[in-house]
Image: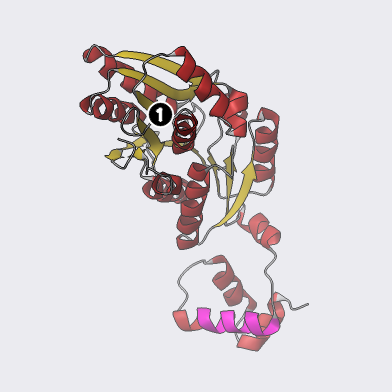
Amino acid sequence: MATLKDVARETGLSVTTVSRVLNKRGYISEKTVEKVNEAMKKLNYQPNEMARALSRRSSNTIGVIMPHLDHPYFSMLLSHLDDAACEAHYRLLVFKSKGRESRTEEYLDICNGNRVAGIILCSGHVRTEVFSNGGSPLITMERFMEHGTSAVECDNFQGGRLAARHLIGKGCKRLLAFTGVRGMGMPADQRVEGFRGVCRENGVEYWEVPIDPRIYDTLEYGELIEQELDACSGVDGIFAGSDVIAAQVIQACSRRNISIPGQMKVVGFDDTRIASLTTPGITTIHQPVREMAHLAVSLIASARAGEMVPSRTVLPVTLVERGTT
């Protein structure tokens, strides 16, 4: 197995210079970097990431903890995080908590044990005091935590207002909102707050349905939607807290021969790929997920460099109109 000395011998450079190239320390000419990379390929040299992390007191890895990987929003977010990390010369270490607090805390321990450059937390199932002794920058996405380094969110409140205004503007008189997870305080709860405010301002009748955590974990909303369509007679507009819920609303309405958008109008949230693949396409609130992902990675880099970072950043949302309205 090739060693650092072998790479140095192959390039005619010192071990120190080769080490600086690998660790991106100080100014190194492009010619030197190219020479080292060619030698590494020729000798099939694999850097010892753990040893490098120990020498630098942190690695070039970012830990990412998500509640789902199969949810369209989180898969889209992960894709953008990977792009942003690659551009900044980081790698991702990805974990799926699946709604288990103990699992999330275990993953946090793993991240700290591996001396990650930073942690991006997208899971809501964790005690805030866990972070009080953390050594790595912690960036939360769609979750504001007292012990976090910085939080990145979209304007959930404005998103709820945009959804309600759009449905009312389309003539809806009785609205139903599926949004928020029961027992989990999250920024996404502000969606229903914005929705509620617009309904009250316009004197429109409305119902709110928080999601049970077990349903959120399984992403199976069909039975709940059917129950609420029975309970809330005369509903003609639905605000779904995600495009996944909106897609299942379309299915439920199809089973009941309720035409969309003729008899029922639907607005989702996130603007994931699924919103443009259903029939009809889903009118939805667009989250700037790409911008949020790049911001999260840049905040880690800034925090590592000792720079001041904002405790919270809220990015604007927009409404994208498609066939459901």
Q: Is residue 131 visible?
A: no
**Viewport quadrant of the N terminus:** bottom right
Q: Residue 242 at x, y = what percent?
A: 44, 34
Q: How many marks overall? A: 1
Residue 212: horizontal and vertical position, in percent?
Answer: 57, 21
Comparing 178 with 264, the one in front is: 264
Which residues fall within the magenta stretch? 33-43
Residue at image mark 1: 258
* Residue in the picture at 21% in, 27% down: 169
Neighbour tally class for label 1: few under 14, some 14-19, many 20 plus, Cα within 10 Å? some
Quadrant assignment, res 322: top left
Q: Residue at image x 48%, y 47%?
A: 77
Residue 59: give x, y in percent of width and height. 60, 55
Residue 12 painted magenta: no
Classified by dominant secondary structure, the portion drawn in magenta counts as: helix
Going by the image, does 129 lie left or right of 265? right
Eyeballing the image, is 94 above or below 197? Answer: below
For the C terminus, the quadrant is: top left
In terms of depth relative to the viewer, which is nearer, 285 or 225? 225
Residue sitting at 23 percent across and 24 percent down? 171
Instruction: Specify how the rendered protein is coloured.
Output: secondary structure
Q: Residue at x 69, y 83 (%)?
A: 43
Element type at mark 1: loop
Asked whether residue 240 is in view, the answer is: yes
Q: Is residue 51 left or right of residue 213?
A: right
Instruction: Give coordinates of residue 255: x percent, y percent.
Output: 50, 31
